[in-house]
Amino acid sequence: MPSRSGTVFLLAATLATAACDKQSPAPEQANVAATAPATPDEVTPDEVVSDSKAAAPTSGAVDRTHKGEAAPALAFADPAGKKVTLADFRGQPVLLNLWATWCAPCIKEMPSLDAAAAGAGDRVRVVAVSQDMQREKVAPFFAERKLTHLAPYTDADMGLSLHYRVNLPTTIMFDAEGRELWRVSGALDWNGAAAKALIAEATL
């Protein structure tokens, strides 16, 4: 029987190489060549993905079918390497972004996510959690690209991606009580008008 560490490695490797093909993801997800992030005109705050489980979410579309679900109690590492969970941010809305340095659409949307974090200030905490298995890659990635409003959180076991069974990037909005409001699969212009309206829902 394989060891636990071996099992985690196999699951992570499977996600990195195959899970991005889940339900034939749209071009703004990690398994295809990078293209420009969705513009504000391509997504509106009222856009909702169908409840049909057979339908794959449109890249950049807003999925509200999980609204009210509690944030998972899964640990990931803060910039100092200390284990934290989403519960540690309770009391403040959290915009959780799952991404990786090997994910072209993730890289493309990261500057707008950094700008959104700057604009949100203390109203919303933007938490970008890398799904890289080599956490040492993340801080230099941020420094090189001058992403000064994001902290290098890491999830080397890819626990969050495996839990949600999602392609990268995926972004999930939680209210101050840790309940999901909506999620977006694929890249988005997080500094655009439509995204700002979405983020503002968490502070109403």
Image: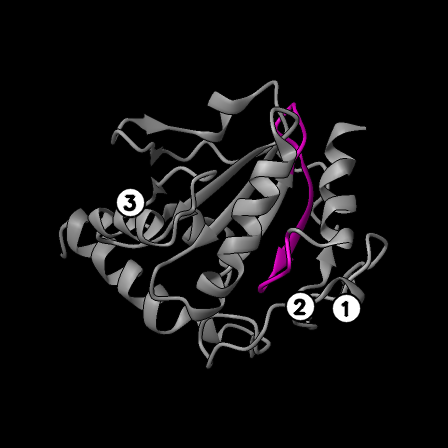
Real-space CA distance between mark 2 and mark 1, rounded to the nearest whole angstrom: 6 Å
At 31% from the left and 53% from the top, the residue drawn is 144
When the figure is inspected, residue 152 is found, relative to residue 193, above or below; the finding is: above
For the record, the magenta segment spans: 174-190
Q: Residue most toward the top?
A: 91
Image quadrant in which the N terminus is located = bottom left
When the figure is inspected, residue 88 is found, relative to residue 101, above or below; the finding is: above
Total number of numbered discs in the rendering:
3
Question: How is the rendered protein coloured?
Answer: one colour
Q: Are marks 2 and 1 in contact (CB under 8 Å)?
A: yes
Residue 122 appears left or right of 111: right
Q: Amino acid at mark 1?
A: Glu
Q: Amino acid at mark 2?
A: Ala
According to the picture, the residue beneath numbered tag 1 turns out to be 42
At 78% from the left and 37% from the top, the residue drawn is 201
N-terminal-most mark, 2 or 3: 2
SS at mark 2 in the image: loop
When the figure is inspected, residue 9 is found, relative to residue 173, above or below; the finding is: below
Residue 19's spot in the image, x, y percent? 42, 69
According to the picture, the residue beneath numbered tag 3 turns out to be 139
SS at mark 1 in the image: helix
At 42% from the left and 53% from the top, the residue drawn is 162
N-terminal-most mark, 1 or 3: 1
According to the picture, the residue beneath numbered tag 2 turns out to be 38
Residue 175's spot in the image, x, y percent? 68, 30
Real-space CA distance between mark 2 and mark 3, rounded to the nearest whole angstrom: 26 Å
SS at mark 3 in the image: helix
